[in-house]
């Protein structure tokens, strides 16, 4: 079973920030938090990952709580092309990845 | 960034035939490759993990004699669906984990859509 829980779906207005939460209360000390997204009929795309500290790249920011039991992916200025299913996954990377149901994000004009 | 390709991108075949899907890491060497299956409106389901030069490890409920996996080199893994039936119609996705990556990020292919008539 997936080790994370995410809301089934979320809406966001174009140009606004999209904040996608993820609960991973059973995360182990050596497990990273990874975020991927999947646009319809394509393979998943890597977004960002983190261990303890908050991370930012050109796509998004990742905020991890101090106890590491939850995190939030932030898309600072959502566009219509960000409409996708977003998966939050915990693990040690090269080992097998178990996908949960993810959050279906709808960005609306 | 690292690129993983799959071939073919889509395939239609008759029931009872076998279909081979290739997964290649184009600009990096992959110690481990993973195969997933995805049915419409569902999440990705891990089928098997393959390591170069050794036998694949299949997830519970996945028939190893039906889904043959070969990982002959550090840049190529193949999945053969033998004696395909309509219920095998699905979106098959591979991913690869790079040798020497500090956090073992996985890179996903674009997927192969299989339709069995």
Image (cartoon, rainbow, N blue to C red):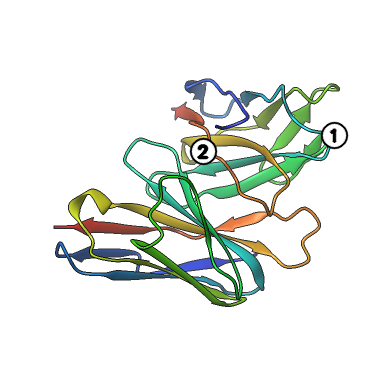
Question: How far apart are the two marked residues, 2 and 1, measured between alpha carbons?
Answer: 26 Å
Residue B1 visible in the displayed image = no
Where is mark 1, residue-wise? A52
Left or right of A15, for residue A109: left
Q: Nearer the viewer, residue B52 or A89?
A: B52
The spot of residue B107 in percent (x, y) is 60, 58
Residue drawn where x is 84% and y is 21% of the image: A67
Is the residue under label 1 in contact with that under label 2 (CB below 8 Å)?
no
B47 up-or-down from B27: above or below:
above
Q: Quadrant of the C terminus of chain B?
A: bottom left
Q: Is residue A61 left or right of residue B70?
A: right
Q: Which mark is residue B105?
A: none
Label 1 Cα crowd, 10 Å radius (few <14 / some 14-19 / many 20+): some
**Residue A7 % position (x, y):** 53, 20
Q: Is residue A28 above or below residue A6?
A: below
The residue under the point 47% across, 52% down is A43
Query: Is A87 in front, or is B59?
Result: B59
Residue annotated with mark 2: A82
């Amino acid at each position: 079973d997936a080790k994370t829980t995410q809301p089934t779906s979320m809406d966001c207005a174009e140009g606004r920030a999209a904040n996608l939460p993820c609960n991973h209360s059973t995360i182990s000390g050596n497990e990273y938090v990874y975020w991927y997204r999947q646009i319809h009929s394509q393979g998943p795309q890597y977004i960002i990952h983190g261990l303890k500290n908050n991370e930012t790249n050109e796509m998004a920011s990742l905020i991890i709580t101090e106890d590491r039991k939850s995190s939030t992916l932030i898309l600072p200025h959502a566009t219509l092309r960000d409409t996708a299913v977003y998966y939050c996954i915990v693990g040690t990377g090269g080992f097998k990845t178990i996908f949960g149901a993810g959050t279906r994000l709808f960005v609306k004009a | 960034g690292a690129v993983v390709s799959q071939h073919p991108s889509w395939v239609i075949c008759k029931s009872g035939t076998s279909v081979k899907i290739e997964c290649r890491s184009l600009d990096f060497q992959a110690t481990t490759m993973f195969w997933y299956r995805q049915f419409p409106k569902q999440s990705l389901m891990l089928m098997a993990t393959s390591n170069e030069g050794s036998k694949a490890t299949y997830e519970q409920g996945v028939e190893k004699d039906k889904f043959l996996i070969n990982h002959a080199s550090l840049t190529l893994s193949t999945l053969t669906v033998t004696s395909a039936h309509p219920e095998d119609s699905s979106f098959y996705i591979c991913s690869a984990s790079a040798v020497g990556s500090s956090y073992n990020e996985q890179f996903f292919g674009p997927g192969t859509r299989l339709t069995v008539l």
